[in-house]
Image (cartoon, rainbow, N blue to C red):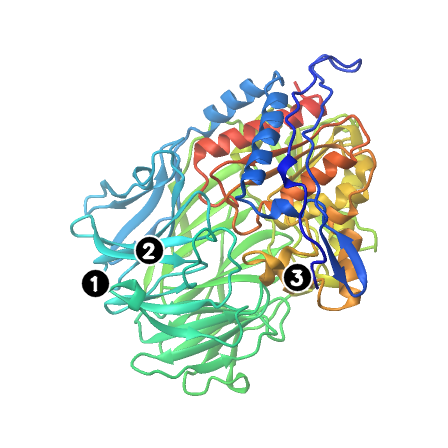
Amino acid sequence: MVKKSVFVGLSAVVFACAPDTKKTNNEATDMTLEYPKTATCDSSYSYFGTTVKDPYGWLEDDYSEQTNAWVKVQNALTESYLAKIPQREKIKQRLTQVWNYEKYSVPFTRGGITYYFKNDGIQNQSVLYKLDANGKEQLVLDPNTLSKDGTVALGVTSFSKDGKYMAYATAAAGSDWEKIQILDMSTGKNLPDLIEWVKFSGIAWEGDGFYYSAYDAPKKGEEYSQKNEFHKIKFHRLGTDYKTDEVVYSDPKNGQKTFGAMTSKDEEYLFVQASEGTSGSSVHFRKRGTKNFVAIDPKFNSENNIIGHYKGKIYLQTNNGAPNWKLVAIDPAKPTQKDWQTIVPEKEHYLQSVTLADGKMLVVYLENVANHLYAYDLGGKMLSEINLPAFGNINAIEADEDKKEAYFGYTNFTTPTCAYKLDVSTGKAAIFRQPKVDFKSADFETVQVFYTSKDGTKVPMFITSKKGVKKDGNNPTFLYGYGGFNISIQPNFAIDFIPFLEAGGVYAVANIRGGSEFGETWHEAGIKMSKQNVFDDFISAAEYLIKEKYTSSQKLAVHGRSNGGLLIGAVMTQRPDLFKVCLPKVGVLDMLRYHKFTIGWAWASDYGRSDDNEEMFRYLMTYSPLHAATKQEYPATMVITGDHDDRVVPAHSFKFGATLQANQMGKQPVLIRIDVNAGHGAGKPVAKQIAEYTDQWAFVFKHLGVN
């Protein structure tokens, strides 16, 4: 693939145009927009003899003066539009009010001490606490003190075996780049050690140090645009300079792999999982004191999760020959697949997770997109089912191999996460922390339906609304989907939906193909040359909601983020008549060049690449939102991204937004909201979240006619 020509005309990137505040004949609050003029450049690429133009390619330089100028005028236009929406301030007030409740993470025990994260309400970042011997809460680490605006977030934390030290990662402005520091738990102060350029990493202790994953330091100015290649696992010994850390595992011949490290509880084994993309992993291990790694599953044609090492056996959750996953036990002396012992065989439902606890196993299945929790013995015999409330989602389990006390978090669409304490020996669970939210959840209900997609596949969908919602085709409805990367979208409480539900809105979640709702088969049915199934499933979900008179095309908003942003970009260019409002957020929107930026190459396992072969290129061209946008009437659209997103780089949204503005033939607005000093979403401070959701819902309320 060769770039055929150079960028030109960048001296006149944008011409700021104030919005026309004249009223239209339709609504007193409408505005006729005059979009900033986005310069084009003479840029194109050749794919198997076909030339594809890239007129807004200059926006790929996220930090140029020209791009920054473009961002400012686009944000100014968006703000001027949103500022005139009368519901905006009331939405912000209600969001701030309802957000302000105590939130607890699932507790975990390290070194005999119980820890948990808590947010008092609207703190920008949650705070780490511990319980002393008297059950009194004590502060451990407050991330809100690490930056003035709350944009430094805490990532993974990991304690040394004796509990004396806690290594923790932090990231700034939503970036995937992290730094690791070490807290001395006895003094409450950091050690001098500071590890930089950490990315996609865990922290795995062994003795007086730990394993972590990192890249070489990028060149100056390339922190947010570097193509992430040649990942490495390193070992850091306390008190040393991280620049001298030993490289323990890498592949100098293939830069497009990522590596993760894990140590067993007794620290006798180091496990390494390597991935060539987002699907498929190899697994190797070595015994402490040795240098050579031994393969458990050396290929990349299945996915594997190391559960742990216990009483001489390695427990591995795998979909090797089992699309719905199974659990096997492995003798470290005979690790090859022919010697694996199947403990929990593949069953009808998707085996989602396994956790060792009290000499047993806590096993989570996903049954019709709702979680069920079981206790098994180590031989694979099911002992009991743990009683759970109405269908929902177990979003975390914390347990210890030899202790009967465990914790888990449980939530659904109308109930925030409640932390439960579980006695593994009896199977009895009791509430540990239950949040109190200013929301009458009893007034709302969730139903699950199965609708038929274009090819006849039955697809589940959750619909949440006020009880007794009237099916008259006039309900404002918000449809969400994802559809990719083996990620299942399960019942989950989202604070920001409360104003919409209270205003009579209907919230629907379509469990479209590409996820793992029904195991690997469901995933594979929505990838590469089958990706159109994902879009068809979502379009069929919208048609179902209209047919069943939950809503109409004039009352329907659709939203997705990241891979879900691709989803919205695709369906709005394929069926713009079906939706009133479209919100693609931090989306993958240029399907020909996505693999050229940061970690984008890793997504090829789901998408395929434009340079794979001509068939793949032409298939990507059929749905790539950037290239499918043509002159036609589009729904009211607000493209949302962050200027520091180094996972799905903002150029996707920049180019797509500019293309939509140039091609909009209808009267509905096409805006782009670019959050400054923000990334893909992880660790975003609460203040920024409230601001973003305020704008999102203000835009939706206006165009769906919600008062």
Direction from residue 533 to residue 416 in the image, left or right? left
The answer to whether residue 557 is above or below residue 370 is above
Name the residue at 77% across, 14% down: 24
The amino acid type, in three-letter code, at marker 2 is: Ile
* Crowd around label 3: few <14 · some 14–19 · many ≥20 (10 Å): many
* Crowd around label 2: few <14 · some 14–19 · many ≥20 (10 Å): many
Direction from residue 433 to residue 494 in the image, left or right? right
Name the residue at 72% across, 48% down: 42
Judge by depth and name the residue closer to the eye, 459 or 666. Answer: 666
Q: Position of residue 422 (x, y in %)?
A: 39, 52
Q: Earlier in the sequence, mark 3 or mark 1?
A: 1
Quadrant of the image occupied by residue 321: bottom right
The answer to whether residue 668 is above or below residue 54 is above
Give the SS element for disc 1: loop
Asked if the residue under mark 3 is in contact with the one under mark 2, i.e. CB atoms within 8 Å, the reply is no
Closer to the camera: disc 3 or disc 1? Answer: 1
The amino acid type, in three-letter code, at marker 3 is: Asp
The numbered dot on residue 606 is: 3
Q: Position of residue 500 (x, y in %)?
A: 61, 27
Quadrant of the image occupied by residue 474: top right
Direction from residue 194 to residue 651 in the image, left or right? right
Q: Earlier in the sequence, mark 2 or mark 1?
A: 2
Q: Which residue position holds label 1?
A: 239
Q: Answer yes or no: is residue 449 visible.
A: no
Give the SS element for disc 2: strand
The amino acid type, in three-letter code, at marker 1 is: Gly
Work out how far the residue at label 2 is from the one at label 1, CA to CA, in angstroms. 13 Å
The answer to whether residue 616 is above or below residue 656 is below
Q: Which residue position holds label 2?
A: 180
